[in-house]
Image (tube, grey):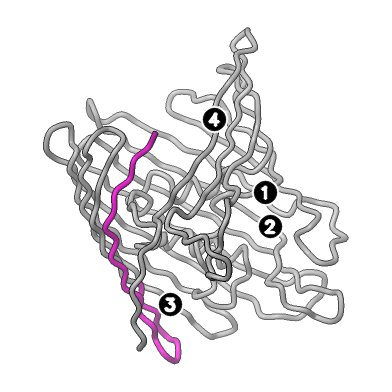
Amino acid sequence: AERVSNLSDAGSRIGLKGSEDLGNGTAVIYNLEWAFDGMENGEAGSGTAGGFKNRLAYMGLTNADFGTFTAGRQWNPFYQTIVEDTVADDFNGSNVITSASQRAMTATLAAAPALSNADAKFSRVGKVIAYTTPEFAGFQANAAVMMDADLYETNSRKNADLSTINAKYSYDVTADGQLFAKLGYIQGKVSDGSQINAGQVMKKSSKVWGLYLGYLSDSVKVTATYADGNQSNLYGQSGPKAKSKGWDLGASYSFGPNYFSTVRANYGQNELKVEGDKDKVKSWAVGFEQKLSTRTRAWVEYGQEKYHNNADKPKNNVISVGMRHDF
């Protein structure tokens, strides 16, 4: 197989975030964030993507008694249920490991024909209105709906394209340790982009539920997630149905002064079934992180993804060595 060498940006962002107090415990909140490639040559015809990419752009109202309403491009609440607070999400290299639970969500919502087409998408979603309840005795819930008239080439649908509802609960078990549990559900009418005939795009109904369990403390973190989804056809269209599932198990240990040194490992597995054909991916990663200050850290990480039940059975290996500063 062909081998190449390449330096890449693990994830640079710039943005604005703030709030304005309106009185009576209510405030306006806003968050604008763009991603950019700091390694880009910037030369014409270089083949790089170039420019800034919109990550977040939302505004809302928050109140300690009534909760938070937001509208715009924001974090997918279901993604936050199955990925946020996990060991897999703590890896610094953006291409070292992909959450298997998120891959299951992507394969279902994007109607992906194979797991190789199910990259880590739907982390953020646009054209969304969301509501998050206040936290009460460790319990909190949220719901969101997306309506996008541009989702299909020919869109005659009147209802929501995606909707999700999620809940989480945290419980203090030690002075610095908490048990977390999160449960979520997301459904949508999606498309894999294939044409049935001129001007008509295949549409599918997708449903995914997910679960997160974790123990978090200053020194130890153990997390487990699971996502299970299925696709079916809409409007009497004929096409393959699919089932997708994925799970992750990760652990990390922090030590030294202020717990600035951390070792972590994560293993995940995916399975996608389409009309009897099964596609499987096994992924794992290990890494060491050293904080140089509260806002600066360096790391070395290694990850591997291995595809099964494919004709060529590809295997991807990634080594990430880098440094990050937040300001």
Please say if the residues under marks 4 and 1 sit with CB atoms less than 8 Å apart.
Answer: no
Most common secondary structure along the magenta stretch: strand
Say which residue appears at 41% left-offset and 59% top-offset: 99
Say which residue appears at 58% left-offset and 17% top-offset: 65
Describe the element under mark 2 as helix, strand or loop: strand
The kind of residue on which mark 1 rests is Ser
Q: How many marks?
A: 4
Give how far apart the Cα atoms at labels 2 and 4 are: 30 Å
Say which residue appears at 47% left-offset and 38% top-offset: 168
Q: Which numbered circle lies on residue 232?
A: none
Q: Does the magenta portion include 320?
A: yes
The residue beneath circle 1 is 163
Q: Residue 36's spot in the image, x, y percent? A: 51, 51
Q: Is residue 164 above or below residue 311?
A: above
Q: Is residue 14 above or below residue 252?
A: above
The kind of residue on which mark 3 rests is Lys
Please say if the residues under marks 1 and 2 sit with CB atoms less than 8 Å apart.
Answer: yes
Whichever of callouts 3 and 2 sits on the residue coming sooner in the sequence is: 2
The residue beneath circle 3 is 280
Describe the element under mark 3 as helix, strand or loop: strand
User: Which residues are the magenta region?
Assistant: 305-327
Give the label, 2 or 4, closer to the camera.
4
Q: Residue 218's spot in the image, x, y percent? A: 23, 35
The kind of residue on which mark 2 rests is Gly
Circle 4 Cα neighbour tier, 10 Å, few/some/many (<14 / 14–19 / ≥20): few
224, 202: nearer the viewer: 202
The residue beneath circle 2 is 188
Outermost left residue: 256
The residue beneath circle 4 is 17
Please say if the residues under marks 2 and 4 sit with CB atoms less than 8 Å apart.
Answer: no
Give how far apart the Cα atoms at labels 3 and 2 are: 24 Å
Whichever of callouts 1 and 3 sits on the residue coming sooner in the sequence is: 1
